[in-house]
Image: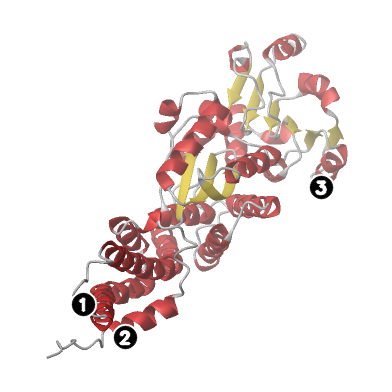
Amino acid sequence: MSELLVIGISHKTAPVALRERVAMTETEAERFVRELVSSEELREAVVISTCNRTEVYIVARNSVDAESVLLSKLAARADIRPTELVDIVYSPRNCDAARHLFRVTAGLDSMIVGENEVQGQVRRAYEAALAAGTTGPFTNRLFRAALQAGKRVRTETALGTARVSIPSVAVTLAEKTVGDLGESSVVVIGAGETAELTARALSEQGVTTLFVANRRVERARELAARFGGDVGSLDELPQRMIDADIVVASTSSPHPIIGVSELEMMMESRDGRALLLIDIAVPRDIEEGCGEIPGVRVLNMDDLQNAAARNLQVREGEREQASEIIEDEIDRFSGWMAQQGATPTIAALREHGASIVEQVLAENDGRWESASSRDVVRVEAIARAVMQRLLHEPTIRTKALEQGGGHGRIAVLRELFGLDEVPEEAAGASAAAAEADFGQAAEVRPLRRES
């Protein structure tokens, strides 16, 4: 029976220095999930990688083996030992894994609780895996249900009405550091969704001098026009930074955009004026060590997390209502999971019982010297009747688990009977056929001895 597993690392378990080592671009994530599903252990895979988390959702037949494979691959990517990675990852399974994704999508697990951007990030991650051909029935159902749960939380509660986001917290920190932003010269590096939100938050604080640097000049020009700023290429960045008061970096570059040596040279031309660098990218856009340069202060995602924890108070009533919605959606998904487990389990249980009967009969074949052919047929019928009666009640109770979200108990049943050792193809008898046979078993009448 297939199981759902997530291996994740987030702002709750690791600092940005570790998160950036496992972070993936869209291209890297696509390559990673393709590699995962090419192994025998894994069947479906989706990767969510944002500035605050990298999570890999997989469907596997053996979750223990799959977890080992996945940890090894993530550790190799981060260039650390798997034992080190174990200390900072979380790995819920089945309904717990689904619950985690639902909470992530709803913004309940975000650094900024209730932030809206994460729903779009989850959707894009799922669509990318769908395009890569690494999803399947399980992950398709899971992610559609998660997006539905997130939509309900935002529609039915006031959790996301404040529209607080990481860029807004970054701008608040900038204001506290340099004072009134209306007179500040700001450079935004990047032109993606986070850069757009940052530019909007700066504009709302009265920033009129805005320079957007990006490799895609057309996209940068669009942002600059929308928020009344200037635009240029990354080649112009060093000169622009000489006049800037604040630089906000938010690109998807795998390597730093601002290095220590270049920044040291640039600071020599600033006549001692301080410079605030805000890095809201993972991996980081600003090289570690830049904050040690005299006159330079660097704020990264860890600093934003601390600020968010101090300043954001989410109303408990809204959190409770959102959690109730999540549990409601989890009940639905759990019921679906149980259905997926019950049908093949009933068939496998019947196949398992029938194989035992056939094995015992085969072992005793030829030992009926004094029995007539009719006696042998009756013995075989008795053996099958015993098997059917013995498994009748477990079959009824297994089917009842479909309505009660009993995926975990079905997994225990399969383990007790060793059903996962039976190829799923061999257990292909339909649940209807199994139910019919067991229904007949309930009415088997005692066989009388011939006089």
Q: Residues within 10 Å of mark 2 (few under 14, many from 20)?
A: few
Q: Check the image and name the residue furthest to the left.
A: 451
Comes first in the chain, label 2 or label 3: 3
- The disc placed on residue 226 is 3
Going by the image, does 343 lie left or right of 200?
left
Q: Residues within 10 Å of mark 1 (few under 14, many from 20)?
A: few
**Local SS, label 3:** helix
Q: Is residue 81 above or below residue 260?
A: below
Nearer the camera: disc 2 or disc 3: 2
Disc 2 from disc 3: Cα separation: 73 Å
- Residue name at image x 46 percent, y 75 percent: 430
Q: Amino acid at mark 3?
A: Arg
Q: Quadrant of the N terminus?
A: bottom left
Disc 1 from disc 2: Cα separation: 27 Å
Going by the image, does 265 lie left or right of 59?
right
Residue 242 quadrant: top right
Going by the image, does 369 lie left or right of 62?
left
Q: Residues within 10 Å of mark 3 (few under 14, many from 20)?
A: few
Residue 279 quadrant: top right
Q: Which residue is mark 1?
A: 371
Q: Which residue is mark 2?
A: 440
- Residue name at image x 26 percent, y 79 percent: 385
Q: Is residue 111 visible?
A: yes
